[in-house]
């Protein structure tokens, strides 16, 4: 886990509760060569600096959980593509459209909330496993070229929260699955 804030720290707890060994790497960096996957949960303007202080990430499956609240570089269509340009491994975009403040309530829901994700085929198994282990149902949205759409969906999720007056869970399902 690269990032120890609300998202990174919250996901680390969910993953540990599911039985995973999780190393949390902060702004000082560290070695992730023994990790099966790398989850990036940093402010968007800290991605390059944060990943630049991480060793052992080359070619590693990477899950980008960031949002462009502090912008994105002009030479990359999405933050996930930017992260991939640094790590070089199969990359997914996930965990960016669910509220960290209610991670502790995810397993209390009658129906498993949805977690939209997109990404490279090589990141699919680990991404869907971690989504399920966190208590969400994965909703595949296509290849990594769809990462920008997930990043651009953030205002919609914020609007739903504002309308409800608190963070929300949501469910995306085919007819007959609800």
Image (cartoon, rainbow, N blue to C red):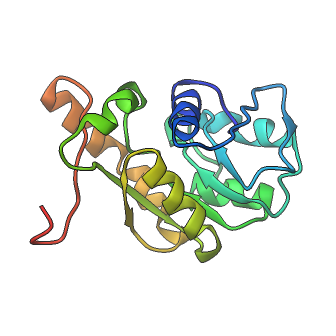
- The image quarter in which residue 71 lies: top right
- The image quarter in which residue 102 lies: top left
User: Which residue occupies 20% across, 38% down?
Assistant: 160
Q: Is residue 46 above or below residue 131?
A: above
Position of the C terminus, as image quadrant, is bottom left
Q: How many marks?
A: 0
Q: Is residue 35 above or below residue 126?
A: above
- The image quarter in which residue 46 lies: top right
Left or right: 47 in relation to 118: right
**Residue 50: image location, x then y, percent:** 77, 36
Left or right: 64 in relation to 87: left
Left or right: 93 in relation to 20: left
User: Which residue occupies 60% across, 33% down?
Assistant: 43
Q: Decide which of 127, 153 is in the foreground and name it.
A: 127
User: Which residue occupies 52% across, 59% down?
Assistant: 129
**Residue 123: image location, x then y, percent:** 62, 67
**Residue 4: image location, x then y, percent:** 64, 26
Q: Residue most toward the front?
A: 19
**Residue 135: image location, x then y, percent:** 39, 46
User: Which residue occupies 58% across, 24% down?
Assistant: 5
Q: Decide which of 9, 29 is in the foreground and name it.
A: 9
Q: Decide which of 70, 9 is in the foreground and name it.
A: 9
Position of the N terminus, as image quadrant, is top right
């Amino acid at each position: 886990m690269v990032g120890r804030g609300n998202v990174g720290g919250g996901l680390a707890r969910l993953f540990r509760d599911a039985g995973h060994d999780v190393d949390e790497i902060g702004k000082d960096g560290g070695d992730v060569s023994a990790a099966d996957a790398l989850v990036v949960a940093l402010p968007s303007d800290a991605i390059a600096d944060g990943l630049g202080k991480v060793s052992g990430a080359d070619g590693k499956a990477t899950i980008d959980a960031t949002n462009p609240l502090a912008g994105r570089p002009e030479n990359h269509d999405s933050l996930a593509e930017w992260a991939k340009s640094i790590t070089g491994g199969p990359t997914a975009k996930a965990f960016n459209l669910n509220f960290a403040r209610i991670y502790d309530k995810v397993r209390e829901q009658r129906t498993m909330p949805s977690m939209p994700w997109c990404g490279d085929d090589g990141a699919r198994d680990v991404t869907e496993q971690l989504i399920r282990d966190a208590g969400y149902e994965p909703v595949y949205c296509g290849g990594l070229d769809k990462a920008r759409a997930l990043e651009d969906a953030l205002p919609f999720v914020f609007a739903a929260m504002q309308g409800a007056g608190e963070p929300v869970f949501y469910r995306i399902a085919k007819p007959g699955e609800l």
